Image (spheres, rainbow, N blue to C red):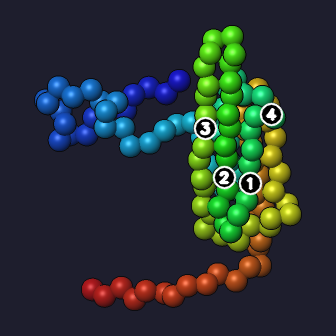
C-alpha cells in the first residue's frame, strides 16, 4: 500500500487532508526496457477470466470486473494507456500472476518517427 503524498505547499496550513489533493494512483507501473514497454497493473482478487486487455490504434485498454456474490459486492477496473512509439501488435504478450497483470509491448525498432522539430528561440 502506498503512503499518502504530502499536500502541496499551497495547501499547508489549510487543514485539508493530503489525500484530497493526490494527483495519481499507484496501481500500475510503466517503463521501457530492451526495446519494449512493460506495464504491470495491480489487480488483486481478480480471476484471469475477469480481466480483458485490448489494443486499438496505439491505445492499450485494461479492464476488469469482479463480483463477490458472498459479500454482495462488485469491483470494476478500467484504464487506458497511450504509447508514444510504434508497437508490434502481433508481439504483445500478457500474463496474470499473484494479482499482477504484466503486459509486454515490443517496440518496432526501425519504425519512422513522424513529427516536426520545433525551433526554440532565445
- Residue 110: percent from left, percent from top: 77, 79
Q: CA distance from mark 1 to mark 2?
A: 5 Å
Q: Residue at x 73, y 59 (%)?
A: 55
Choose the circle earlier in sequence order: 1 or 4: 4
Task: Mark 4: give few (<14), some (14-19) or many (20+) Cα within 10 Å.
Answer: some
Q: Residue at x 63, y 12 (%)?
A: 71
- Which quadrant does the C terminus fall into? bottom left
- The total number of labels drawn is 4
Choose the circle earlier in sequence order: 3 or 1: 1
Query: What residue sits right under mark 1 in the picture?
Result: 54
Q: Is residue 6 visible?
A: no
Q: Which mark is residue 48?
A: 4
Q: Secondary structure at mark 3?
A: strand
Q: Which mark is residue 61?
A: 2
Q: Which mark is residue 77?
A: 3
Task: Mark 1: give few (<14), some (14-19) or many (20+) Cα within 10 Å.
Answer: few
Q: Secondary structure at mark 1?
A: strand
Task: Mark 3: give few (<14), some (14-19) or many (20+) Cα within 10 Å.
Answer: few
Q: Is residue 120 visible?
A: yes
Pointers 1 and 2 in contact (CB under 8 A)? yes
Amino acid at each position: 500500500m502506498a503512503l499518502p503524498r504530502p499536500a502541496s505547499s499551497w495547501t499547508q496550513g489549510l487543514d485539508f487532508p493530503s489525500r484530497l489533493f493526490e494527483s495519481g494512483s499507484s496501481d500500475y507501473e510503466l517503463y521501457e526496457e530492451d526495446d519494449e514497454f512493460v506495464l504491470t497493473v495491480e489487480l488483486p482478487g481478480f480471476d484471469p477470466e475477469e480481466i480483458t486487455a485490448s489494443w486499438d490504434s496505439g491505445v492499450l485498454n485494461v479492464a476488469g470486473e469482479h463480483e463477490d456474490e458472498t459479500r454482495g459486492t462488485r469491483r470494476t477496473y478500467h484504464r487506458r494507456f497511450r504509447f508514444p512509439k510504434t508497437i508490434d501488435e502481433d508481439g504483445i504478450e500478457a500474463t496474470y500472476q499473484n494479482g499482477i497483470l504484466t503486459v509486454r509491448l515490443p517496440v518496432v525498432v526501425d519504425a519512422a518517427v513522424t513529427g516536426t522539430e520545433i525551433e526554440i528561440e532565445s
